[in-house]
Amino acid sequence: MATPRVAVVGAGAAGLATLKALADAGVPAVAFEAADTLGGLWVYGAPGSPAYRTLHLNTSKGRTEFADHPMPADWPDYPDHTRVAGYLGDYADRFGLREAVRLRHTVERVTRTGDGWRVRATGPDGPVGVDVEAVVVANGHNRVPKRPEPYPGECAAEQMHSHDYRGPEQLAGRRVLVVGGGNSAMDIAVDASYAAARTLLSLRRGVWVVPKYLLGRPSDTLNGALARRLPWRLRQRISQTMITTAVGPPTRFGLPAPAHGFLQDHPTLSDALLSRITHGDIQARPGIARFDGDRVEFTDGRHDEIDLIVWCTGYRVEVPFLDPALLGDGADRLPLYRHVFHLDAPGLAFVGLMQSTGAAFPLVEAQARLVAARLAGTWTPPDPARQAAACRDELRAATARWGQRRPHMRVDFDVYLAELGRELAAGRRRAGAAR
């Protein structure tokens, strides 16, 4: 392998897409992966992976697959984690990416040098170091569990984070309280409803629960068709009407009313949750007020006895190997040009540091192509002032739509994918004009 010019941190979907794009552009690279296999969070049982045995895609395969590596036509619309992990392995094999990955190498530190970057990692044979022109951070942001602030009272129930959940046997025979409104919370509550003695689902705020099929099609394909023609506010009204017509408002099932309109938060997809609630196998509860031993009091005054709490409260975004000075107010508040390029550190890029209204794979693929074009010299960014202005405009629009729920990281899947295509074309024109 040629001497690498670029170091990629991570060999999950984002890291592999980056290696593929760099190879296509003729830019030699090396990737460091802490686990002993490729695939990142989709590899069940891999160190640091949050995958659980019943995990499936919550975006349909046609909207999730890489553009240059379609998922098999005979797969179900929502494949399980085993298929997805295998798909990523096949992607690496098809494009010859494995030889560029150093498995079981944990990146400890990335520092700037006079004309580039120094990457230090710890591998099976001890410390290693490599000097490169650029670094691409592609290690994901679902690895450091975010635990809630302490509630009043003392809790005697066993507690775990969804990051440590692996399968329904952990819930069997227990009186389980699942806390959270995201996709993992819904999946785990459904699992518990079959295995546990009793299942409670606590939500502090309402969410839109979207069935995986609407009008006989995967639901994300309908919004995708609308996104190519309509602004998000109009899509919101149409989508909310479709959802409430198809399944009714969340309050019909005892769930809190959503605090925000549809498309103003990450969608929660589940076909099974509402059915299990209507059958009495999951009981909805509002937020927690306090604990008293093995009893929990909710904000509506109800009390229940519990044995186990599963906190589905998300993750903190941390990049521990970078100098904090490079991260400003934090990785989740870092302004990046087009959500990719650091404004003040040439040669530092991020692939996958975002929260999408849809799938991630096509977006990291498009981001990776932008990074590769930059390093190959075929794409040039605008001047620094224009980059900073673009970040401010995006943040203003994101805050208006998503409030303070990580607006720096939020992207609308279809709008952002189209934007990256336009940016690639514009940057190529700028590069051509500069020659």
Image (cartoon, rainbow, N blue to C red):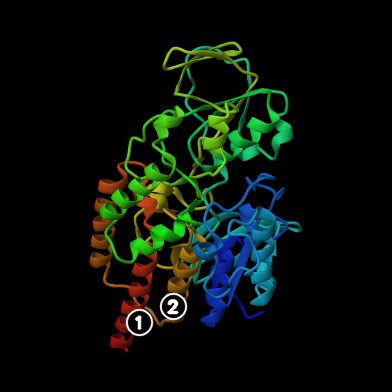
The image shows residue 71 at horizontal and vertical percentages of 61, 68
Residue furthest to the right: 125
**Secondary structure under the numbered disc 2 in the rendered image:** helix
The amino acid on which the numbered mark 1 sits, given as a three-letter code, is Arg
- Counting from the top left corner in percent of width and height, residue 385 is at 23, 65
Find out whether the residues at labels 2 and 1 contact each other: C-beta distance under 8 Å.
yes
* Dot 1 alpha-carbon crowd within 10 angstroms: few under 14, some 14 to 19, many 20 or more: many
Q: Which mark is residue 428?
A: 1
Q: Name the element at disc 1.
A: helix
Residue 298 left/right relative to 39:
left
Tell me where residue 82 sits by quadrant: bottom right
Q: Residue furthest bottom?
A: 435
Q: Is residue 330 visible?
A: no
| Nearest the eye: 46 or 248 | 248
Residue 281 placement: quadrant? top right
In x, y percent, where is residue 176? Answer: 62, 25
Residue drawn at x 59%, y 33% as measured from the top left = 189
| Image position, residue 66 (x, y; %) | 54, 69
The kind of residue on which mark 2 rests is Ala
Relative depth, front residue between 245 and 409? 245
Quarter of the rendering occupied by the C terminus: bottom left
Nearest to the observer: residue 234 or residue 126: 234
Quarter of the image that includes the N terminus = bottom right
Occupied quadrant, residue 77 = bottom right
Mark 2 vs 1, N-terminal side: 2
Measured in 3D between alpha carbons, the distance from the residue under mark 2 to the one under mark 1, in whole angstroms, is 8 Å
Q: Which residue is mark 2?
A: 373
Neighbor class of circle 2 (other Cα within 10 Å; few <14, some 14-19, many 20+) is: many
From the viewer's perspective, is residue 375 above or below residue 171? Answer: below
**Numbered disc total:** 2
Picture residue at 39% right of the left edge, 66% below the top: 417
